[in-house]
Amino acid sequence: LTKTFDINTNESASKLSGRMFGEKGVILPSAPKLIVQAHPSDIASVRYDNSGSDLLATCGDSLITIWDTGNGHSNTSLRGANTHFMLGVDLSGGTVAGSSTDKTCRVWNTRTKRMIHQLVGHQHKVTCVRIFNKEKFIITGSADRSLKVW
């Protein structure tokens, strides 16, 4: 691991590893702070929880894995259809949604780790998903060139 610095402290920018960006002096990292060997196959999507507690990663298999960013360990894995890849993921509060090549979007409760809904209606793979308006709506995008608000 590389040493991390708080850009809000009085440490000079010359001590920080990175490049300066813009007139405000924002530091862009030039090296990763943490590398997690997350999955045995490709990672297709990643979503960071706004509370800063979890990092979600989907991969080229049927799993969504929730990672604890504090220690780099996996908290849980949520499984979609066995033979279809998960392509997109989103997290909001206690809800996780994952889009898949099986033309559906699955929704899980993170506390119980149970699938609570499966959204069916696209004609081709569902490539992306977003949860919005305080978990009241989900929007999906598909290779069928449509967006659906659920």
Image (cartoon, helix red, strand yellow):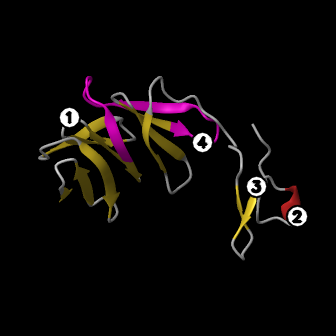
Please name the residue that numbered disc 4 is placed on.
69
How far apart marks 4 and 3 lie (CA) works out to 21 Å
Give the magenta part as a residue range.
67-89
Q: Quadrant of the N terminus?
A: top right
Q: Quadrant of the C terminus?
A: bottom left
- First in sequence, mark 2 or 4: give its number: 2
Q: Position of residue 40 (x, y in %)?
A: 47, 22
Count neighbours of disc 4 (C-alpha within 10 A) and say few if under 14, some if 14 to 19, many if 20 or more: some
Q: Residue at x 39, y 40 (%)?
A: 111
Disc 1 + disc 2, Cβ < 8 Å: no
Camera-near label (2 vs 4) is 2
Q: Quadrant of residue 31?
A: top right
- Whichever of callouts 1 and 4 sits on the residue coming sooner in the sequence is 4
Q: Indicate the quadrant where residue 136 lies.
A: bottom left
Report the Cα–Cα distance between label 3 and label 2: 12 Å
Q: Quadrant of residue 80?
A: top left
**Dot 3: element:** loop
Q: Label 3, on which residue?
A: 18
- Residue position for label 2: 12
Query: Was residue 149 drawn as part of the magenta stretch in this picture?
Result: no
Q: Residues within 10 Å of mark 1 (few under 14, many from 20)?
A: some
Please report the residue visible at 34 percent of the width from the left and 63 percent of the height from the top: 134
Return the residue nearer the eye: 114 or 144: 144
- On residue 102, the disc is 1
Looking at the image, which is closer to me, 129 or 74?
129
Q: Element at badge 1?
A: loop
Compute the Cα span from label 1 to label 4.
Answer: 30 Å
The residue type indicated by label 2 comes to Ser
Mark 4 touching mark 3, by CB under 8 A?
no
Q: Name the front one of labels 3 and 2.
A: 3
Q: Specify which label sits upstream in the sequence, 4 or 3.
A: 3
Secondary structure under tag 2 reads loop
